[in-house]
Image (tube, coloured by chain):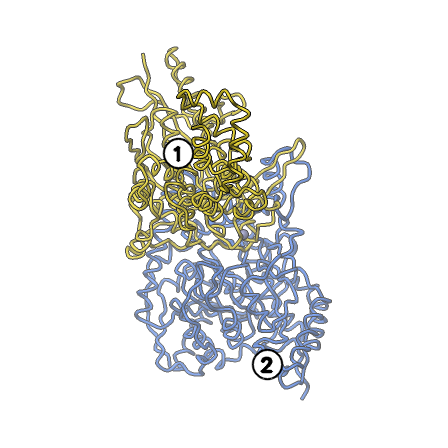
């Protein structure tokens, strides 16, 4: 039997080997850096990899292990979406406006991972300021889907998903505002978790839409998602919206059957216009859950049709204020020859932001303007409250919901860039989860005839992570999808 | 035709919290530029605000002092506009749901009691400071994020003098409540005002003109004076006024237009998603109310009652919280009430006025003053020596007992020394001696003064008088 390539290991597999002494963190990182050098030319998943720094971190972790230190992630390298602050690293949010900016502090999630021994080896590409569903909105490069280089990896955490799928990372962090972890996870065939709003501190996550943003892991299996969540979750006094709810033992919730679990299928999520092959694959996955012991029933989320419009109004409104700080005054790019502050703002921002970011700032400014505020922002908040109530009601009837993650598998590069509205519809099954603040994950559930992965979305109530991880784990362990790798790299 | 002015004030008060409103940075004044900053108050990407509970408490206390309704639910909003000294390009403020609504401030104006109603009191963050040079501007963010309480009055003031009386009463209350040190020179108190005039007897208010950013009470007074004259003259000449915002040029004593109503910012207020609503349980507000500090009127009454001070003394001392504090501390250090009151009201206030100083900055401590008064009471020193020592303590500080010893100012009561000075004084002033013998009492006073001079102020005046009388019999 040949040894597995170290870069193909999951986090928990690598940890077992590190603990047994079969592997050092330096060997692991060295292998990974070689793979990145070889594959990322094609994939373009990383914006930056500081090899020397990665090896330094690995050497320090090996040293600590030798000294008897334990850490839940000691010596494990992670890829970090370019939206999260890691002290000393650049954090440009894939935008020209933040060129030259280096994070002066660690995000709380990063700090907690670091305290458990994790290493931060590279900055993963993304849609600029997390605005997009394909990662094509990055100001720097277009990331390719490892399963088909002519297709998008999904977004906005497309770099994170692609490097995990291509085995250029063991696991990665992303952020999910309207599906930005789950959609790329589905398109790239990895696991993506969007925790309950408030479960992981947002401190250090550059804000897109503050009431919707959550950090989430992208991993090769459910056990890794549970492990990363375990380390990052919990109250943070630096984030007033983080929850004081105690953090359970997520690994303990993982079981191979679904006996006694009630799963709901929201009627409005199985709609005409969905790709037939994707629908058939998701239906097959639902039957598999039933065979594992779950009881399946239909539920209703009546306001689903309004979720995308509601989402874009609220997300853009918040973004228009959140992105006002990028003005060239304190950090990032500033035009050199401004004649006054207004000139400095307008020209720095015009040059620094991409089209989609500008579109959303303008949209958000508009919906908050006097005369339009009531009709758009206020009404959207009312719809949001009712959407949330619908979810609460649905979870009185079942423990979790099963839905597709997206209506299609990964589409071609450039296919939807011309039509923003078409693009926004790829979020149709994911945004309501953020508006309601509940948790959800995407787990691979099969492949189309073209060989593209499809994701099954498991949605749980607020702080129902144990349930959705259990469902995801039982399903994953009973199906062969994890064993498939993107062919060209074998 | 005569016109009536209607004036409203928006007073911005820096609260005396140890740390900023949304981060842990200190609020010290006068630190080197950009040393009291962190990712939060600099608006760095990913940083988040967490509300300072002490700032909320101080705002609620202010509301309680003026009888506001304390709202059990209030929230923070984002006020959006671009300015280089505002790190996030939005200010976290309170728009729809302030901490306190309504209330009123009672004060005396020209010996008449007055009440001005308040509209609201809310909490917001301060901005940084722009330092403009000829070719470039620099920014200091130390002040950015300092908690700022905004008190908004109804337009119920009618003259510059009345506005000034209101502000002085407000300042007195805020200092008493330990809400803010209210040092104007440190920018603790800043005002916006609105002012309109209408013909006497007219029901409807005139066209509202706002004047922004007044940093001194004199500025408020002068800006109002100018506005009322300007508006009255315009209307008197048959002209019309437009609703606008103006700024005050203190050097020229005039206001000038900044922008008219149509050019006003659309601040696009919306609830700040980073900050949960503030909920205040009734029991908590009640507990805070019970800890409300003593207010000026109550203190005045207590000074009279507790120390037997005359009403006049109590009023003078209680007018300034820090002077009253100094007085009571002096008593705790063993001084007698009336003596301490006399010395503070005369010597202390005289020197404070002369040096334009705040009592919190003087070098003399209450214990030094108490010691000094004890020495005087025990006739160890004379009143004249005490004055000299007081002046030294005021300027340089130190211990009264040490100073008396250093300067050799112990009062002289030794009979032979006193007799020598008395003989010398009489010998040098035979005319005065004759006058006294002829029945002129004033001559005795003159001779006592001469003895005191010979003694360098150290002679016991009572003993000198007795000896003089004996000598001249
Ligand atoms: Zn700070």
The residue that appears at 51% across and 22% down in the rendered structure is: B430
- Which chain contains the residue that carries disc 2? A
Q: Is mark 1 within 8 Å of ligand 1?
A: no
On screen, A33 above or below A134? below
Give the numbered dot on residue A315.
none
Question: Which is more foreground, mark 2 or mark 1?
Answer: 1
Q: Nearer the viewer, residue A187 or A373?
A: A373
On screen, A198 above or below B67? below
Give SS at disc 2.
helix
Instruction: Give x and y (percent) for residue B293.
Output: 35, 48
Q: Residues within 10 Å of mark 1 (few under 14, many from 20)?
A: some
Q: Nearer the viewer, residue A80 or B325?
A: B325
Q: Residue furthest bottom?
A: A1
Q: Nearer the viewer, residue A347 or B370?
A: B370
Instruction: Give x and y (percent) for residue B327.
Output: 41, 44
Instruction: Give x and y (percent) for residue B306.
Output: 30, 46
Asked where in the image residue B110 lies, by quadrant, the reply is: top left
Shade of chain A as shown in the rendered figure? blue
Q: Is residue A140 visible?
A: yes
Give SS at disc 1.
helix
- Which chain contains the residue that carries disc 1? B
Instruction: Give x and y (percent) for residue A490.
Output: 67, 76
Which residue carries the number 2 mark? A13
Which residue carries the number 1 mark? B168
Chain whose colour in the figure is yellow: B
Viewport quadrant of the C terminus of chain B? top left
Report the Cα–Cα distance between label 2 and label 1.
72 Å
């Amino acid at each position: 039997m040949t040894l597995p390539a170290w870069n193909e290991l999951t986090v928990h597999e690598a940890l077992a080997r590190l603990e047994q002494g079969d592997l050092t963190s330096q060997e692991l990182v060295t292998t990974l850096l070689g793979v990145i050098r070889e594959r990322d030319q094609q994939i373009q998943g990383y914006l930056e990899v500081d090899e020397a720094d990665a090896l330094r971190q690995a050497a320090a972790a090996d040293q600590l292990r030798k000294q008897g230190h334990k850490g839940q992630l000691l010596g494990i390298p992670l890829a970090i979406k370019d939206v999260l602050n890691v002290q000393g690293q650049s954090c440009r949010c894939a935008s020209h406006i933040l060129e030259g900016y280096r994070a002066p502090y660690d995000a709380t999630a990063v700090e907690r991972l670091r305290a458990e021994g994790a290493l931060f080896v590279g900055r993963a590409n993304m849609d600029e300021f997390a605005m997009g569903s394909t990662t094509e909105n990055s100001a720097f490069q277009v990331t390719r889907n490892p399963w088909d280089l002519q297709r998008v990896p999904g977004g906005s955490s497309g770099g994170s998903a692609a490097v995990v799928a291509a085995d250029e990372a063991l696991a990665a962090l992303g952020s999910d505002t309207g599906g930005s972890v789950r959609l790329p996870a589905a398109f790239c065939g990895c696991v993506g978790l969007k925790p309950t709003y408030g479960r992981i501190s947002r401190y250090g996550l550059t804000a897109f839409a503050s009431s919707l943003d959550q950090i989430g892991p992208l991993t090769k299996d459910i056990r890794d998602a549970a492990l990363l969540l375990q380390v990052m979750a919990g109250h943070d006094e630096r984030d007033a919206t983080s929850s004081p709810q105690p953090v359970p033992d997520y690994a303990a919730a993982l079981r191979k059957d679904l006996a006694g679990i009630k799963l709901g299928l929201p009627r409005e999520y199985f709609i005409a216009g969905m790709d037939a092959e994707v629908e058939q694959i998701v239906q097959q996955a639902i039957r598999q859950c039933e065979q594992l012991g779950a009881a399946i029933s239909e539920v209703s989320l009546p306001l689903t049709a309004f979720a995308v419009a509601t989402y874009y109004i609220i997300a853009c409104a918040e973004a228009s204020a959140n992105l006002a700080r990028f003005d060239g005054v304190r950090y990032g790019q500033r035009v050199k020859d401004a004649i006054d502050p207004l000139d400095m703002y307008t020209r720095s921002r015009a040059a620094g932001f991409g089209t989609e970011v500008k579109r959303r700032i303008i949209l958000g400014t508009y919906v908050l303007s006097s005369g339009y505020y009531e009709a758009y922002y206020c009404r959207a908040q009312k719809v949001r409250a009712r959407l949330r109530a619908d979810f609460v009601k649905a979870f009185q009837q079942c423990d979790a919901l099963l839905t597709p993650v997206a209506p299609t598998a990964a589409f071609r590069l450039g296919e939807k860039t011309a039509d923003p509205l078409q693009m926004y519809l790829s979020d149709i099954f994911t945004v309501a989860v953020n508006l309601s603040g509940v948790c959800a994950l995407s787990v691979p559930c099969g492949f189309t005839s073209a060989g593209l992965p499809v994701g099954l979305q498991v949605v749980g109530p607020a702080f129902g992570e144990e349930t959705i991880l259990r469902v995801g784990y039982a399903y994953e362990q009973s199906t062969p999808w994890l064993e498939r790798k993107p062919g060209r790299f074998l | 035709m005569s016109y009536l002015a209607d004036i409203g004030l928006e007073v911005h008060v820096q609260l005396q919290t140890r740390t900023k409103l949304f981060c842990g940075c200190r609020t010290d004044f006068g630190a080197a530029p950009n040393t009291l900053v962190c990712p939060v108050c600099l608006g760095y990407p990913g940083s988040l605000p967490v509300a300072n509970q002490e700032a909320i408490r101080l705002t609620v206390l202010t509301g309680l002092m003026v009888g506001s309704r304390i709202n059990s639910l209030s929230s923070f909003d984002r006020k959006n506009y671009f300015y280089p000294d505002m790190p996030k390009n939005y200010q976290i403020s309170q728009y729809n749901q302030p901490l306190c609504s309504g209330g009123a401030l009672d004060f005396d104006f020209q010996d008449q009691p007055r009440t001005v109603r308040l509209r609201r009191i809310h909490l917001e963050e301060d901005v940084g400071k722009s330092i403009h040079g000829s070719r470039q501007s620099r920014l200091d963010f130390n002040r950015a994020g300092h908690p700022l309480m905004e008190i908004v009055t109804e337009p119920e003031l009618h003259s510059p003098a009345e506005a000034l009386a209101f502000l002085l009463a407000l300042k007195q209350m805020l200092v008493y409540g330990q809400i803010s040190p209210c040092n104007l020179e440190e920018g603790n108190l800043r005002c916006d005002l609105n002012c309109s005039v209408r013909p006497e007897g007219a029901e409807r208010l005139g066209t509202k003109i706002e004047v922004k950013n007044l940093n001194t009470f004199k500025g408020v007074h002068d800006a109002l004076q100018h506005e009322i004259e300007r508006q009255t003259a315009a209307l008197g000449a048959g002209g019309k006024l437009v609703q606008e915002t103006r700024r005050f040029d203190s050097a020229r004593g005039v206001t000038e237009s900044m922008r008219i109503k149509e050019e006003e910012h659309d601040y696009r207020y919306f609830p700040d998603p980073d900050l949960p609503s503030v909920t205040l349980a009734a029991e908590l507000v009640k507990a805070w109310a019970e800890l409300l500090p003593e207010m000026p009127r109550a203190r005045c009454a207590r000074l009279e009652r507790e120390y037997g001070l005359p009403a006049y003394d109590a009023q003078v001392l209680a007018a300034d919280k820090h002077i009253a504090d100094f007085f009571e501390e002096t008593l705790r250090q063993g001084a007698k009430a009336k003596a301490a009151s006399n010395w503070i009201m005369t010597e202390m206030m005289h020197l404070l006025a002369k040096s334009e100083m705040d009592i919190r900055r003087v070098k003399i401590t209450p214990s030094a003053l108490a010691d000094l008064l004890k020495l005087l009471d025990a006739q160890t020193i004379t009143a004249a020596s005490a004055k000299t020592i007081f002046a030294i303590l005021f300027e340089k500080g130190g211990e009264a007992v040490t100073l008396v010893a250093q300067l050799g100012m112990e009062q002289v009561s030794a009979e032979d020394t006193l007799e020598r000075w008395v003989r010398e004084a009489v010998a040098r002033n035979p005319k005065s001696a004759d006058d006294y013998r002829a029945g002129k009492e004033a001559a005795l006073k003159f001779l006592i003064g001469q003895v005191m001079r010979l003694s360098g102020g150290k002679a016991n005046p009572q003993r000198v008088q007795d000896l003089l009388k004996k000598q001249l019999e």
